[in-house]
Image (cartoon, rainbow, N blue to C red):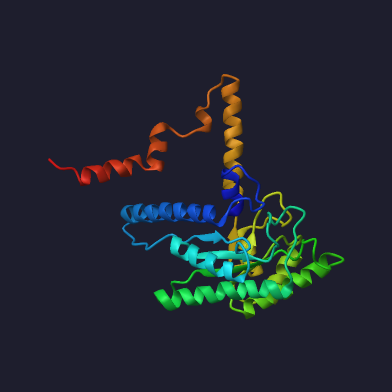
Amino acid sequence: TGFGVSGVNGYPDTQLVSFGEMMNAAMTVAEGLSSAALEMNRESGVVRSSIPCIADGDTGYGNAVNAKRTVFGYARSGMAGLMIEDQVAPKRCGHVSGKSIISFDDAVQRVKAACDARDEYESLYGPGTGPLVLARTDALLATTTTAQNDDDGFDEAIRRCLAFVEVGADMTFLEAPRTKQQMIDYCSIVPKPKLANMLEYGNTPITSPAELKQMGYTMAAYPLTLLSASIKAMQQSLDLIKRGESTDDMILTFDETKDIVGFNWYAKEEDRYKTE
């Protein structure tokens, strides 16, 4: 999530972090997921090749050619897919004001370039190796649409999603629908898999996974739930410390923390390769 990577670097999600910084974060996440998959294999005996992750490609960091480089970069970093959107750079979080979008034709070409890069990557490394392309539109709430009301903006968003599918997008993402009816209509009109963005206190009604599936969504993202929960826990813990009270009910034991960050795994690996 661009919001998350921006946040941990001390910035709002307004594209103040670069493609290089996002790539570094993607490689770190991919390495962590690889280690987690190996650990799960050892514990369960079930072989998992990997744990897939979709990266935030933002606007592609430039024109259509830049978008192609973004696809190749994320694929090489170990990402299973990436999201490409139609905002004007610098973009911003889809649930805040002040968003602007590029023209319909430019948006379609940006997504087409990403899909071409996916196919070109597969031509080099084999079928199925190219990352999934998740095409997002912010047309519903953008300030640069000619929409006079939500219905007009929704129609433009649907138009863009249909065009994204036409040029090869594997999945679409209509950002920030305001009502469940808009969510249902989107799913009934646009073919292929679709993503729902469950951002608490955002513009979209929070809906259970079962209901989202019934509507026609394929995948749900909860991009800020863990970040927001961790911030709240930190604030509460710091407040307890300030008041001189115990934080025991807020934290894990030291042994649990060591296990989660990998100390127990490291000790086993160390013993495995120990020499006499």
**In the picture provided, is 203 more to the left or to the right than 130?**
right
Residue situated furthest bottom in the rendering: 166
Q: Nearer the viewer, residue 47 or 10?
A: 10
Task: Please name the residue shown 59% across and 58% down the image.
Answer: 221
**In the picture provided, is 61 more to the left or to the right than 105?**
left
Residue situated furthest right in the rendering: 148
- Picture layout, residue 237 above or below residue 65: above
Quadrant of image for the N terminus: bottom right
Task: Please name the residue shown 45% across and 60% down the image.
Answer: 77
Quadrant of image for the C terminus: top left
Task: Please name the residue shown 46% across and 53% down the image.
Answer: 29
Q: Is residue 80 visible?
A: no
Q: Position of residue 201 (x, y in %)?
A: 71, 49
Q: Which quadrant of the view contains residue 161?
A: bottom right
- Picture layout, residue 252 above or below residue 156: above
Q: Which quadrant of the view contains residue 274?
A: top left
Q: Which quadrant of the view contains residue 114?
A: bottom right
- Picture layout, residue 72 above or below residue 249: below
**In the picture provided, is 152 more to the left or to the right than 61?**
right
Q: Is residue 20 visible?
A: yes
Q: Position of residue 33 (x, y in %)?
A: 42, 54
Task: Please name the residue shown 52% across and 65% down the image.
Answer: 81
Q: Position of residue 215 (x, y in %)?
A: 66, 68
Q: Position of residue 151 (x, y in %)?
A: 82, 68
Residue situated furthest left in the rendering: 276
Q: Nearer the viewer, residue 4 or 198?
A: 4
